[in-house]
Image (spheres, grey):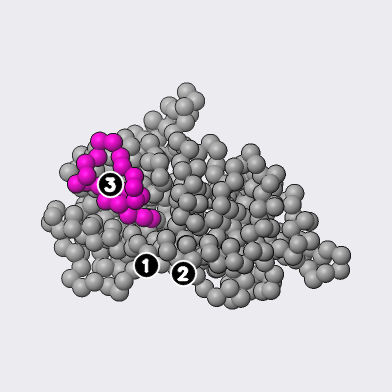
Amino acid sequence: MSRFLLSCGGTGGHLSPGVALAEGLVARGHEVVLLISRKKVDARLIEKYPQLTFRAMPGSGLAWHPVRFVRFVSSQIAALRFCRGLVRTFQPDAIVGFGGFTCAPAAVAGRLARIPVTLHESNRVPGLAIRLLGRLAARVYLPIGIRLSGVSAAATRHVGLPVRREMVRGPVAAAREAMGLYPNQKVLTVLGGSQGASPLNAWVRERLPSLAAAGVQVYCVTGLGKGAPETLDLRISGAEPVRAIFTPFCDRMAELLSASDLVVSRAGAGTLAELIRCETPAILVPYPQAASDHQRANARFFERQGGGLVIEQAALAGLEAEVLDALFNDWLLRKFRGNLRRMDRANALESMVQDLETLARQRGGTPAPAPAPAVASA
């Protein structure tokens, strides 16, 4: 058995693959601690995983405003002190960082203790933390076709994003019933990532009557702090009611995506990996202010692979027409789903687990003697 410390807090896009990797490592008999932030979104996301061990660390995101930057530096110093203490007590055989502000303190603490550090980047434009820390890493896991300056080919591994084992496509009718939706009407789901997206929320509210008139149900995940839960039944001209559900948070993504005919979403790598796993077509609206414009790069790659379409936030006026054209074109939806099925062939989780076991073995850890049943991933 080996020990692994996974730094994956701050956003759902970091935490979800951390949970997936932890599940895979624990299934192989290893001991895992997941480092998360003290943000509310992390606390909500981990509620489903009491079988895993989480430690909340100090830290705040990078900001260039002078006062906030001082706060960031101070919090990173506190986080480094915290991580060095945890490394001394837990004594991991390897550290895995998924980017974000929780990544650097764990990676530096590992390097100071001469513990192998590995990094995983899921976006097609590597983030600041991964770019800065890449030279410290024994392994850098990158999307297919992406290179990172300063990282040797020997240290680079091309893998996708590990996906939680619960993310499996289920029967449509059962999923709609579980999510409180009517079974025989089209379902449009709107996602804004773990933080929510106010422009997408506003678009749904504005277009709700016309979507209902077309017989389209809506399930909108608004984001924490962006409104209370609400369920509406809209009846247009005496027709059957059409349901619209608004919720700040959803921890049943496999059921929600299985229930959906189409998703309108931001283009974070975690969301795209789950869309691929559940074979759910999407119209992506990249967040224009995303660091290094990485969401646009993610979205364009998804579109080129045939998983859906891309529309810019500045062009939201044309989104409803695109949504209705796709929703009622069964041939197109089948084509998208077939492409998504093809995109899901690689097994990122199994590749990462085996590679991490190799690193642990080289350092002196002992991998589990017998492999567990195959773990699923994107």
Determine whether the residue tagged by mark 2 lies in a helix, strand or loop. loop
Whole-percent x, y for residue 185 in the image: 69, 70
Q: Position of residue 91 (x, y in %)?
A: 21, 52
Q: Nearer the viewer, residue 255 or 306?
A: 306
Task: Name which residue type carries label 3.
Answer: Val
Contact, mark 3 vs mark 1 (Cβ under 8 Å): no
| Amino acid type shown at disc 2 | Val
Query: What count of labels does the image hold?
Result: 3
Whether residue 174 is visible, yes or no, is yes
Main SS class of the magenta portion in the image: loop
Q: Which residue is mark 1?
A: 376
Q: Is residue 170 left or right of residue 210?
A: left
Q: Which residue is mark 2?
A: 168
Q: Which residue is mark 3?
A: 140
Relative to 359, is 351 on the left or the right?
right
Disc 3 element:
strand
- For the residue carrying disc 2, how many other residues have a C-alpha within 10 Å: few (<14), some (14-19), or many (20+)? some
Q: Residue at x 34, y 47 (%)?
A: 145
Q: Which residues are magenta?
A: 141-161
Are the residues at dot 2 and dot 1 in contact (C-beta closer than 8 Å)?
yes
Q: Residue furthest right?
A: 237
Q: Amino acid at mark 1?
A: Ala
On whether residue 94 falls in the magenta region, the answer is no
